[in-house]
Image (cartoon, helix red, strand yellow):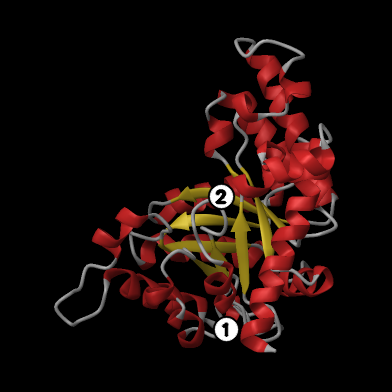
Amino acid sequence: MTKHFCDRLCESVKAKNSPLAVGLDPVFSRLPEDIRSKGSQTDEDFVIDAVFQFGCEVIKAVAQHVPAIKLNIAFFERYGYEGIECFHSLVTEAKEQQLEVIGDVKRGDIGHTCLAYADAYLSEHTFRTLGLKPSDAITINGFAGSEGIEPFAERAGENGKGVFVWVRASNSSAARLQDAVTADGQMFYEILADITAEIASMPKYIGESGYSCVGMVVGGTSPEHTTKLREKYPNIWFLVPGFGSQGGEAVDCVRFCKPDGTGALINSSRGIIYAYEEHKYKSAFADDWRKCIEQAAIDANKVLKDSFDKIYK
């Protein structure tokens, strides 16, 4: 029987002593020169091969330091069906490095359409004949309410996978919608969180760790509203974007963790995968961009650990 997603995640976070997830959002124009210079940006086959090579190297560079990697499918869909193949191939590469893999796909609908989306990203059958592996979890859009969450949760539970419901975004303009107050005094995102938590709390979705396979995406850039969710929903695992380039402070992000260090994956994308663009890393490692990426992951872990220790130690 496949182990529960959050049980695996707990083990990985504790083994790596890190809540950090590295986001892989590859943009060809920002890839290292020694990859880009081997072909033309107008040659789509070359571009996809370059993106795949870069993704593989990022995965290898961070694998021993972090428990998870998050692949944003938007940066692969732009290349059509070959980009989708590249996405799934990188999922497989990451899983072979013993990483938990979050497919950041933000799918959303209701009923049988949700099941089709879930099968596309979470079902073992979809990939077995291709020699590929599915993501361990995906992000979904919960704005259709329970009918848009339950089908994903069902498939995740059946397959030992997870889903993270997009409850509160990390961008500033999201507040106009998500912080809108309803007649009963609740903010919109709080209602969505309650709906998500009702589903997540069903016994069939809870693992031995006490966490549900249904989690929430809550940005780390709005701590005044969202850190209270940690206390309100003890069985929820949070995926926290916004750390690093988006302005989320480590001390705010780690508040989503419990005192044992579990309960949250804190994502950093550009600040790590493009670390070789930063002067401090170029000065230290010159053209060794792989080492720059690895060191950025090590540094991010230290910042998170120092902030965690200030709160819990």
Q: Position of residue 238 (x, y in %)?
A: 55, 70
Q: Are marks 1 and 2 in contact (CB under 8 Å)?
A: no
Left or right for 245, reference 222: right
Type of residue at label 1?
A: Pro
Q: CA distance from mark 1 to mark 2?
A: 26 Å
Tag 1's secondary structure? Answer: helix
Residue 149 is at least partly visible in this image: yes
Question: Residue 11's quadrant in the figure?
Answer: bottom right
Which residue lies at the image location 46% right of the left edge and 78% below the top edge? Answer: 227
Q: Position of residue 93 (x, y in %)?
A: 80, 43
Tag 2's secondary structure? Answer: strand
Q: Earlier in the sequence, mark 1 or mark 2?
A: 2
Badge number at residue 203:
1
Residue ID for mark 2:
104
Type of residue at label 2?
A: Asp
Question: Residue 48's quadrant in the figure?
Answer: top right
Quadrant position of the N terminus in the picture: bottom right
Q: Position of residue 275 (x, y in %)?
A: 69, 43
Dot 2 crowding, Cα within 10 Å, few <14, some 14–19, many 20+: many
